[in-house]
Image (cartoon, rainbow, N blue to C red):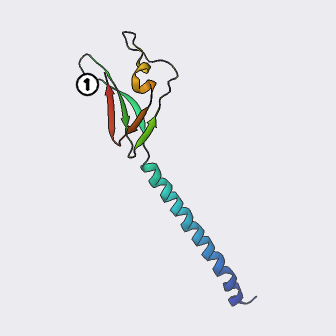
Amino acid sequence: MDIAVLAQIISPLATFVVAAGILYQGREARRARDDEDRPQIIVDTDYTGRFTTNIVVRNIGHGTAKNITFEFSAPLATTSGYDITELPYFKHEINFMAPQTDLPSV
């Protein structure tokens, strides 16, 4: 086999491998960018009040959250016996929450 024939066979294969690698890197970059813009909702407690504790729903992500629902494996009760999971935005849904915002409740 001549070296020119071998080069004609290997060249398109190498081009295909490089193009597949570039396509893979582009997809991974897009996936990482999408994950960065994803909303992240957490339920946190705020103990800054002297005699009160606030339950705070926070969107710590960089994306807008829509139609937020909550599920609890067990009810959360205060020391006075009030069921926190019966708060309106835990019982129903939150329609919209902007990035980097929080929704406190005493």
Residue found at the far top of this picture: 80
- What residue sits right under mark 1 in the picture? 48
Tell me where residue 30 appears, x and y as whole percent.
Answer: 49, 58
Q: Is residue 84 above or below residue 29?
A: above
The N terminus lies in quadrant? bottom right
The C terminus lies in quadrant? top left
Amino acid of disc 1: Thr
Left or right of residue 65, residue 20 in this image: right
Q: Is residue 58 above or below residue 63?
A: above
Q: Residue at left 42%, top 50%? A: 36
Tell me where residue 90 appears, x and y as whole percent.
Answer: 43, 25
Q: Nearer the viewer, residue 15 or 96?
A: 96
Q: Quadrant of residue 95?
A: top left
Q: Nearer the viewer, residue 22 or 3?
A: 22
Q: Secondary structure at mark 1?
A: loop
Left or right of residue 8, residue 40 in this image: left
Q: Is residue 13 above or below residue 68?
A: below
Q: Residue at left 52%, top 58%? A: 28
Q: Residue at left 73%, top 90%? A: 2
Q: Residue at left 69%, top 82%? A: 9
